[in-house]
Image (cartoon, rainbow, N blue to C red):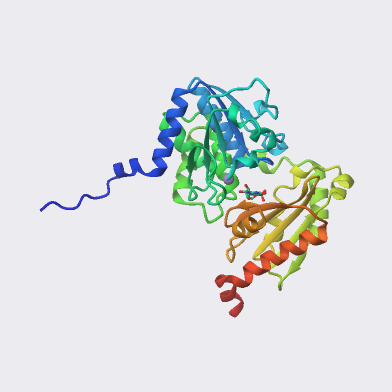
């Protein structure tokens, strides 16, 4: 009697994930001119993914434009290729396809981009957000991937693109950013193996760490002092919240991009389960949420018209500070009260 066929590694070859990767690879092979875009307020995963993909497409002999609605933050300017990122879309720009990376929905790339979408050919989404609209003609979305860089790496492998130093540095930054320097729960053996390959290909962990973490302008520390001083604790110390006002930026001469990681500080308080950073912008308050283990802040942010992951998420809300703070705290407190982990912790 024949044994039932074992699942061979080859059977993975026809999973929806690899089908999408194969489709994306076919689009690359067929086309000549590509646009690579990512979300507003780009972080290391967004720009690292975009620049690694652009470098890979370039090596395949294609012409590539990398677009972001916002300027490259100062701490990501060392990324190889970042000097070519443009915030301008020319009326004459036409592409065979657009690759949108690290973006749960196309709207997060910005209004100027959305209004031109039909000029940009077929759209391919390369992402790792579990939620969001299912935008894009081809979707290479793996919610289990630690960073969008992992999804980009998969496509480059499929295309047979060798890991150059330029690609390796950019991909290493995607992993370092989204795993919190290989500390968070998404730091798997697979992530560490990929990181090792990137180091072999020329990524230097010490130099990348210094470039990302020791490039602060003095104004950043002045801002940090103000923001830390704004710490408020709620719900028996389980919610930690800090706020950055436009007045603080003016007083210190700092800029909002200097504060991208400030939400880590309220999270570092022992009793805090959920942390929030509220930042005043001309478009409203940009809220960053982080959690330790009790709640899914991605769900909280989605309920407030934002998005993100279980442990890191965000949304934008209009209104005065008191209102935005109250709504943020209420949403987090509600999620905490419903959390079995939280109940278990407070019971002992
Ligand atoms: P951060 O707090 O670092 O800006 O964002 C944390 C995570 O939440 C990232 O994955 C980011 O893409 C997502 N995120 C932040 N703000 C928003 C938002 O307004 N809408 C959506 N859909 N996602 C957001
Ligand atoms: Mn990401």
Image spot of residue 43 (x, y percent): 65, 42
Left or right position of 121 against 334: left
Quadrant of ligand 2: it is top right
Above or below, 69 against 219 in this view is above
Left or right position of 142 against 240: left
Given the current orientation, which residue lies at the most extreme right position?
251
Image point (53%, 39%), residue name: 136
Q: Quadrant of residue 289?
A: bottom right
Image point (60%, 62%), residue name: 292
Image point (82%, 61%), residue name: 322
Above or below, 287 against 80 in this view is below
Q: Quadrant of the C terminus?
A: bottom right
Given the current orientation, which residue lies at the most extreme bottom position?
348
Image spot of residue 121 (x, y percent): 54, 28
Image spot of residue 220 (x, y percent): 79, 45
Q: Quadrant of residue 14?
A: top left
Image spot of residue 112 (x, y percent): 69, 33
Q: Please name whichever residue, 331 or 121, is drawn nearer the observer in this view of the structure.
A: 121
Tag count:
0
Q: Work out whether residue 78 can be spotted.
A: no
Q: Work out whether residue 143 can be spotted.
A: yes
Above or below, 35 against 268 in this view is above
């Amino acid at each position: 009697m024949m044994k039932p066929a074992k699942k061979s590694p080859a059977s993975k070859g026809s999973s929806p994930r690899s089908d999408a990767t194969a489709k994306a690879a076919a689009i690359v092979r067929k086309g000549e001119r590509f646009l690579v875009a990512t979300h507003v307020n780009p972080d290391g995963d967004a720009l690292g993914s975009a620049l690694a993909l652009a470098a890979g497409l370039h090596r395949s002999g294609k012409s590539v434009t990398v677009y972001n609605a916002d300027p490259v933050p100062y701490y990501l300017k060392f990324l190889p290729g970042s000097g070519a990122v443009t915030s301008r879309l020319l009326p004459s720009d036409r592409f065979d396809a657009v690759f949108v990376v690290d973006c749960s929905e196309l709207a997060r790339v910005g209004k100027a981009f959305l209004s031109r979408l039909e000029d940009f050919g077929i759209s391919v989404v390369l992402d790792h957000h579990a939620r969001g609209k299912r935008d894009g003609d081809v979707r290479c979305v793996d919610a289990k991937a630690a960073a969008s860089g992992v999804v980009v790496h998969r496509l480059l492998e499929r295309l047979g693109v060798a890991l150059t130093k330029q690609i390796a540095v950019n991909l290493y930054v995607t992993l370092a950013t989204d795993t919190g320097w290989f500390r968070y729960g998404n730091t798997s053996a697979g992530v560490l193996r990929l990181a090792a390959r990137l180091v072999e290909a020329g990524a230097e962990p010490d130099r990348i760490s210094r470039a990302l973490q020791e490039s602060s302008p003095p104004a950043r520390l002045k801002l940090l002092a103000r923001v830390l001083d704004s710490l408020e604790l709620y719900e028996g110390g389980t919610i930690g919240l800090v706020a950055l006002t436009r007045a603080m930026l003016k007083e210190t001469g700092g800029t909002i991009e200097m504060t991208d990681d400030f939400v880590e500080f309220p999270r570092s308080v022992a009793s805090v389960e959920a942390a929030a950073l509220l930042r005043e912008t001309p478009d409203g308050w940009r809220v960053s949420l982080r959690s330790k283990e009790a709640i899914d802040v991605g769900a909280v942010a989605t309920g407030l018209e934002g998005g993100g992951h279980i442990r890191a998420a965000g949304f934008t809300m209009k209104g005065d500070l008191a209102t935005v703070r109250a709504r943020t705290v209420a949403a987090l407190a509600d999620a905490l009260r419903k959390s079995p982990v939280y109940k278990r912790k407070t019971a002992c």
